[in-house]
Image (cartoon, rainbow, N blue to C red):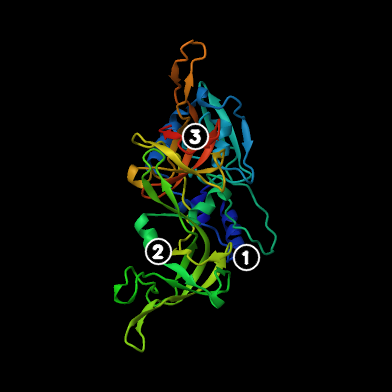
Amino acid sequence: MHPLQRRWPSWPRRQAIRALALTACWPALGWAQTAGRYPITPQQRRIAQHVAQMGVPWGELAADAPARYTVQRGDTLWGIAARFLQQPWRWPELWGMNLEQIRNPHLIYPGQVLVLTRAGDRARLELAGDEPPLVKLSPRVRAEALDEAIPALPPQVIEPFLADVAVVDPQAHAQAPRLVAGPEQRVLLARGDRAYARGQTGQGATLAGEPLEADRGERRLLDIYRQAQPLRDPQTGELLGYEAQRVGQARLVRPERQELDAQGRPTLEPATVDIVQAREEIRLGDRLLPARMRERQPYIPHAPADEVEGQVVKVHGNAMQMAGQFQVVALNRGREHGLENGHVLALLKNRARVADRTDETRAELLLPGERNGVMMVFRTFERVAYALVLQVTDGVKVGDRFTNP
């Protein structure tokens, strides 16, 4: 059986053969094996199986849920779920309304029509028709992948954080190699420049730290990061780590080594690197970290199993003080606190102190921390996590609290 028939068993053999012919025309692109890349978790499948049998109570749907919706290019699973459910983060339940037709809840394609049906006080979501939309392709060079499944979250918002932002602990930051010299004594470097980097510190026989060496004799890639910014807990002031922004990439040409000069004194020869990528001018003192591959993971929304409480550490963006919808915030909780990708968290306003103006004594009152919105965690480190604000009433600022949804 052709792989495409296994993916969509309802496809006739002739369509599978036609698809095979298309992949032969564009071998460089091929078909992405997204079913394996976006696995369904046991928790999600249990929910889907339950809802597929029982349906969703009509009262849990959005007030203006459409009877039919045609999936558009540029849609996200969050946006589609928001059209049907009052709580869009529960979209595994939405796709589980008909487990037989929507076998993989992450594979929804432009052109498919979603139909909302009602049986008594229960609702189900079905696909109109058995086959995926037919896409006609002419024989020309294409720069896009043939697999155009709808993503979970806006990719243009979160993708820069998957490879361009790193959080390192204080020790790793202090010991990270750094650029120490450039051509013609320049302090600003650009793509194509040769530069020199140093991993060890100290002089002579008192060198400390790991030297910058090649991996198994190969030229290794290194990400170049601007001097990292400290992330501190808003309440305790504790240093959680350093946030580093990638500004470029270098390729190691010659490793760092120690030699003896004419007088027999140990002398350090820095490593030689070539700047192969620069998003802005690179400076002496910028740090080097092992190159990261861009991560592509499924984001399956679910509530944390245990109670979680914390605060917003940083609103991402230069000179940004408040975050709105589809902006990123850093949290003072991470993997060691149980956070994982896909965790949905409720944002709470800080409890404000106000004076009772109706009382002559002007008694001080402490207002409750009202719910302000919802965010989803999409990247975690040991003690820090990044989340995307998906719904918000007022702006989110540093120090705002979060808890279970």
Q: Residue 308: x percent and y percent?
A: 37, 36
Q: How many marks?
A: 3
Residue at the spot of label 3 = 374
- Front-lying residue, 139 or 222: 222
Three-letter amino acid code of the residue under disc 1: Cys
Closest to the observer, 175 or 67: 175
Q: Is residue 290 visible?
A: no
Residue drawn at the location 65% of the way across and 52% of the way down: 135
The local crowd at label 2, few if under 14, some if 14 to 19, many if 20 or more residues have their Cα within 10 Å, is many
Query: How far is disc 3 from disc 1 in space, using C-alphas?
Result: 44 Å
Q: Residue at x 60, y 40 (%)?
A: 129
In the picture, measured across the screen, residue 157 lies left or right of residue 299, that is: right
Q: Residue 125's spot in the image, x, y percent?
A: 54, 33
Local SS, label 1 = helix
Q: Which three-letter amino acid code belongs to the residue tagged 2?
A: Ala
Pointer 1 residue: 25
